[in-house]
Image (spheres, rainbow, N blue to C red):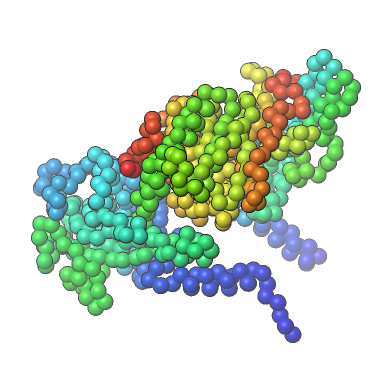
Amino acid sequence: MKQQLEPSLYILICGIFLFLGCQTDQIPIPENKQQNSEQITNVSFSTFKRLTGLADFKTTFKLPENSEDFVALRSSEGNAPDDFIVDTDHITQTVAYGKTAYSFRITPKEGEKEDRRFYLIVYDKKGNWLDMIIESTFSIDAAGNPKETGYKEIYASAGRGTGCGTIFTWVINCNGRGKCADGTCDLCSQCLKTSSERVCGKDEEGHDDGGFTKPIQPGDGGGGAPNPEDEVIVALPILQNPKKECNKVKKLAEDVLFRQKMNNLLQATEYRFEKIFTAYENPDLNSQPPSLFKFIEMNGTISKPQVEYGYFNTLLGTMHSHYNSLLSVYSVDDLVDIYQKLKDPGITDDFFSGLVTKSGTRYLMTIADRTQFIAFGNKHLSTENGKQKLILKYIEKYNISTSNSALENEKGFLKMATELNMGTALFSGNSDFTQWKRLDYANNQVISTTCN
Amino acid sequence: MKNIFLILMLITSFLSQAQIVDIKNLDSQSDLPSGSYIKDINGDFDKFVGTWVWVDAGKSVTFKLQKITRYLDSEYNNYSDFMIGDYSYSSNGRVIVNTISQNSDPNPDLHPMYSCCPYETQIMFSFKDVRLRKDECRAFFEFLPGSTTQMKLTLKNNEGPRGTLVPEGGSLDITQSNPSFIIPNDIILTKQ
């Protein structure tokens, strides 16, 4: 007798095939990563403190000035920053050979270095928690993917010893096969690429003041085969591609017509109705002013904080205004509208949402991780129950309200976007919309990075 | 007899393992374990429950707000307490709209108002204006200072852009929906 496949079994088999279809040197993004004998997990700051007993762990890190206090302080540049903010929102735990290590992304207080990244490693050595700082050289390859090389240990606390460290890195790459490549979705448009390097202390063979790194080769430890007893094995937090989102915004900032429309919205904040522009690809490249976009304007009804609009699924983005007494950041209903667009696979991954408010804020939001944003939407925006809870979270947990200052709301919104894993990138524009800064949240403060 | 005993054991075992979550906990339902009960532990809904009326110059608005307990959400396989609401509006003896007593089923989809959770002295409901066919509005009820029998009602349209997908070649002109409501807004309701 011919048997029919159960729908759930069919989905499972399809899922396995899709998963296997991604298996080259890159793997789809998993929640937890297993690398041979290492178990790699993302943990929260409270979990980190509970598991390590480091209850008073500081969220800033200043290198000691007295060289006797530490074993190594070196940098190939000779001008390593010495004062850092520790990102406690993305902590990676690595358990290998019964030992645990944690890695944190850290950012120099003076601002992010364009070509370097820094990590704080907290690791267990014979029952004591020691720390070290790793510096890497950062670049973006031709495909726009982030790349880190040349790991160096620029600081290690006393008790470091002479062992080496194995650093696993995880980079989110676009493999060119997904929806962005040919318009069809094979669930493999974003994959993780892994690599590993060894970083050794000052007394190891081959060491010089700049430290040294060697890629691990099969059968070759790179500066000596790893000894699990002495080796610090740690995976760094997944490296996102910061420039990718900046590049989307840069394209808008350079567009004269886009800036004109944002200025129109600025004027519209004086009215008692909302205005929206929807953006499409410009079919007439000879139009004046020259623009990549064709914008269509719609106006809402007076005294009603809503604007209804029609759109084709060739939509590239929207920009709208908030008049007086409306929020200085994106409202829950604004997010619902973006979510409904992004659920449609016909809408581009590069979708953007602009917002200009009477409070003086000028924002652009891009979707850094569509899967993550849709997961956020499914959880918080798809049902009335979810939306009501999110509205209450705005007020109770993230202190976002019309009576707050724009800065308070901005901080609350970024905190929410970080804690609820929205998968978006938020940018703040200057008065003529030519300069944009990426805004991130870490350690109870807003971190601003210049984009262009 | 043996079977009944086994069933009772199973039910007892299930109930003893069900996690009770305070309704003020704003975690998403999908984050809660299956079988959880999102419960109005402190009775925060109770003060809003009842029939609330406004009368003025031949016009009358009535809200019937009900608390539903231990309702099974089959999507997440958990239980929750919440509130539903119905309303009526009459003018000079003529009924303009009435959703009260139309349906005794507690299913929130069958009522024009729903609230997941209270907030201090106020509560927010989703609100459907069934006459004007507006789905996505909100009704806020807030007690007057020091009062337990009088609340102010504020009806609001949803904020923000609301897009409608149009087939290629169709018209992008969308008629903006009516910003008003069929029932009077910004009124003071008194508990009956």
| A280 or A431: nearer the viewer | A280
Task: Please indicate whether residue B190 sits to the left or right of residue A423 in the image.
Answer: right
| A71 or B168: nearer the viewer | B168
Say which quarter of the image contains residue A94: bottom left
Task: Please indicate whether residue B2 sits to the left or right of residue A347 in the image.
Answer: right
Q: Is residue A134 visible?
A: no
Furthest toward the top, the residue is: B57
Say which quarter of the image contains residue A445: top left
Taking the spot 76% from the left edge, 33% from the top edge, the residue there is B132
Residue A248 in percent (x, y) is at 41, 48
Q: Is residue B162 visible?
A: yes
Residue A376 in percent (x, y) is at 53, 49
Residue A430 in percent (x, y) is at 37, 33
Report the quarter where the N terminus of chain A lies: bottom right
* Vertical order, B56 against B20 (above or below): above
* Vertical order, B97 against A388 (above or below): above
Taking the spot 67% from the left edge, 39% from the top edge, the residue there is B174
Task: Please indicate whether residue A51 sits to the left or right of residue B192 in the image.
Answer: left
Taking the spot 26% from the left edge, 51% from the top edge, the residue there is A117
* Vertical order, A414 against B156 (above or below): below
Taking the spot 52% from the left edge, 23% from the top edge, the residue there is A270
How many numbered marks appear? 0
Furthest toward the right, the residue is: B93
Residue A416 in percent (x, y) is at 47, 41
Task: Please indicate whether residue A313 sits to the left or right of residue A198 in the image.
Answer: right
| B47 or A104: nearer the viewer | A104
Report the quarter where the C terminus of chain A lies: top left
